[in-house]
Image (tube, rainbow, N blue to C red):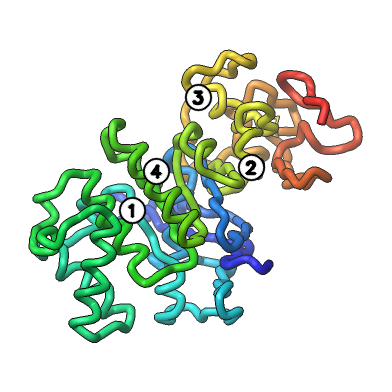
Amino acid sequence: TDPIVRVDDLHVDFDVRSVNGRRLGTVKAVDGVSLEVRPGEILGLVGESGCGKSTLGRAMVELNTPSAGTISVTSARTGDELSPGSRARRRAVQIIFQDPYSALNPKRRIGAILNETRVIQGFRNRGENHDHIAQLMADMGFGPEALQRYPHQFSGGQLQRIGIARAIMNDPELVICDEPVSALDVSIQSQILNLLADLQRDRGYAYLFITHDLSVVRYIADRVIVMYLGEIVEELGPDHLISDPLHPYTQMLSSAIPGRQDRERIAIRGEIPSPLAIPAGCRFHSRCPFAMPVCSAQAPPMIRRDDGRAVRCHLYAGPAAQRPGPEEHPS
Ligand code: SF4
Ligand code: MG
């Protein structure tokens, strides 16, 4: 099947200015990313904060504008390509934000907020909108009185359920989930994750699931993409996050998953460099325990392997490619 979204060599740049307006430089928040999201899949997107994953997600819902490259959206239901800026595209690709409170207008009642989204997306019949919203809120576990209340009258978990209701209101095909549980109490994170998993299973949505938390993505994703400083550095299956991460950065992230004892740990070293000063060569070389002379001189290409995995690292280039860490699993 065709992908719902095809991102091709996407670049999103931001000008950075000092408080008095002096231009400090350009941040290449997303720097040449290509990926596809297929109908009904959960694609995990991981990396430390500042790696560009939210910027990429926001570009996919047209909340920021690419500097170069394309994002094409094709409905799996109709086969039509949905043009940029169109209502059909806005309906098809929706987003759930990390902070559910700041995503909702604090001065308006929930019923009015949800109705507004209905209207923006082209549904103007008041009675039908009311019934639709009441049913959707009931599906999310709310009684009709919730529509009369204001955002501050709900807990964080309840607000995120309302954020989810708003995102799925008009039956999207892809939902960008941008750290949807990381602002919530640990005790309710699994409720929200289970709700998202149930919705995906029952309604067939695809998710781009953005998180810095590998234990979450390992639980929920069908496929995983790892980003570092604006680039994709690895594509792998969720099981390989633990058993066989290839890129040293993925190995480092994976080592930090709590409760792991099964392989040698690679300590988290240093911090992600400023995106205004991206290291030459491999962007990870300043933190990589396996860095070789070539790594600071040449940017490694994305190496696509026969098993469908991909890794951007000199260790895997050439016929004598070696690998760090434990021996390859027999497969
Ligand atoms: Fe480390 Fe070199 Fe691979 Fe970069 S290319 S991750 S520095 S081994
Ligand atoms: Mg973010």
Q: Amino acid at mark 1?
A: Phe
Instruction: Give left or right: position of 149 versus 37.
Output: left
Q: Residue beneath label 4, please?
A: 193
Q: Secondary structure at mark 2?
A: strand
Q: Nearer the viewer, mark 2 or mark 3?
A: 3
- Separation of disc 2 and disc 1 at Cα? 24 Å
> Which of these two is toward me, 280 or 254?
254
Q: Amino acid at mark 2?
A: Val
Answer whether labels 1 and 3 touch (C-beta < 8 Å): no
Quadrant (top left/top right/bottom left/bottom right) for the N terminus? bottom right
Q: Secondary structure at mark 3?
A: loop
Disc number for residue 233: 2
Q: Residue at x 27, y 48 (%)?
A: 99
Tell which circle, 2 or 1, labels the residue nearer the N-terminal end: 1
Q: Is residue 19 visible?
A: no
138 to 65, vertically: above or below: above
Q: Is mark 2 within 8 Å of ligand 1?
A: yes
